[in-house]
Image: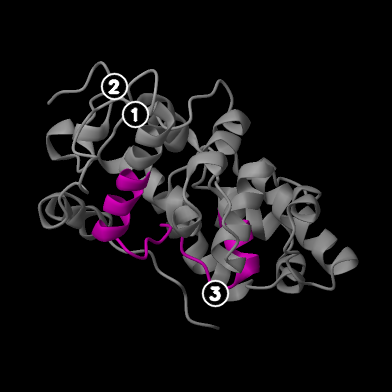
């Protein structure tokens, strides 16, 4: 079997973020006005603030990685489908054995739904996900020559695949600068704020409009890691946040 792509240790990934705040001080003129002013120059100032936020993320972690383990585009697609309402670590435990024997849609079909269900039974909603795994494998074989399609419309036509899953696969497997808005990105974008929105699609489109092109490829990984390990839902750890001086969140703890 091909070598598994393994995510970095979360602690190792996030430790450099605080160190980078000291190693990479705010760019001149952006220092640290938490929110942009109203009136003349507000748009220019906010653009500079956004540029500085992503400059710091990039300096702290130049090449971020997702935490789902996979072998190829197909196993990545399956892993993302399995990760709905489940933790990445829980999915990784289940897919270690699964991908050792079924790392292609043809092999997944040969495995069958009963065996797939048994292998992923530790994951939430495993019965439905087993059905999706077999159904999407069949579609890939019958309609796409056994290959994972590269465009969003085709990906979203697969069973169990929504816009967020399609964006993740397009970004990680094929290098498209997509923004996959999960619960962490939705929270962080509304909290800082970056691109406030009432729905994930509103946030996605807002982020696409404001993130500088040079940062778009890795933007959703930086935001996910920031939301998962620093800007947490119940108690954001503002004391170790490298963009605390650029954040306008009223509940900020620094």
Closest to the camera, between mark 2 and mark 3, is 2
Identity of the residue drawn at 32% across and 64% down: 62
Determine whether, in the image, residue 62 is placed left or right of residue 202.
Answer: left
Single out the residue that lies furthest toward the front.
Answer: 40
Q: Which element carries disc 3, helix, strand or loop?
A: helix
Q: Are marks 1 and 2 in contact (CB under 8 Å)?
A: yes
Question: Is 92 colored magenta in this rendering?
Answer: no
Label 1 CA crowd tier, 10 Å (few <14, some 14–19, many 20+): many
Label 2 CA crowd tier, 10 Å (few <14, some 14–19, many 20+): some
Whole-angstrom CA distance, mark 2 to mark 3, is 45 Å
Q: Residue 132: image x %, image y %? A: 73, 49
Choose between 33 and 160: the one closer to the eye: 33
Considering only vertical position in the picture, is 38 above or below 219?
above
Q: Which element carries disc 2, helix, strand or loop?
A: loop
Determine whether, in the image, residue 25 is placed left or right of residue 147.
Answer: left
Whole-angstrom CA distance, mark 1 to mark 2, is 5 Å
Residue to which mark 1 is pinned: 192
Asked if one can make out residue 237 in the rendered structure from this viewpoint, the answer is no
Residue to which mark 3 is pinned: 100
Residue to which mark 2 is pinned: 249
């Amino acid at each position: 079997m091909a070598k598994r792509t393994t995510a970095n240790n979360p602690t190792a990934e996030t430790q450099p973020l605080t160190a980078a705040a000291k190693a990479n001080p705010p760019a001149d003129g952006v220092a640290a006005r938490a929110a942009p002013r109203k009136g003349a120059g507000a748009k220019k100032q906010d653009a500079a603030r956004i540029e500085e936020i992503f400059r710091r993320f990039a300096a702290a972690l130049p090449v971020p990685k997702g935490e789902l383990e996979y072998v190829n585009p197909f196993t990545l697609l399956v892993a993302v489908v399995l990760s709905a309402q489940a933790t990445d670590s829980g999915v990784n435990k289940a897919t270690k054995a699964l991908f050792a024997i079924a790392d292609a849609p043809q092999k997944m079909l040969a495995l069958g739904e009963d065996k797939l269900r048994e292998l992923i039974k530790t994951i939430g909603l495993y019965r439905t996900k087993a059905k999706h795994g077999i159904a999407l494998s069949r579609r890939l074989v019958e309609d796409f020559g056994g290959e994972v399609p590269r465009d969003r419309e085709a990906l979203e036509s697969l069973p169990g695949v929504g816009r967020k899953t399609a964006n993740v696969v397009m970004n990680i497997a094929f290098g498209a600068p997509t923004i996959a808005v999960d619960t962490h990105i939705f929270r962080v974008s509304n909290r800082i704020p970056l691109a406030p929105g009432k729905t994930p699609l509103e946030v996605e489109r807002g982020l696409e409009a404001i993130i500088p092109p040079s940062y778009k490829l890795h933007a959703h990984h930086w935001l996910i890691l920031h939301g998962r390990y620093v800007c947490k839902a119940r108690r954001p750890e503002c004391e170790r946040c490298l963009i605390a001086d650029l954040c306008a969140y009223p509940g900020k703890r620094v």
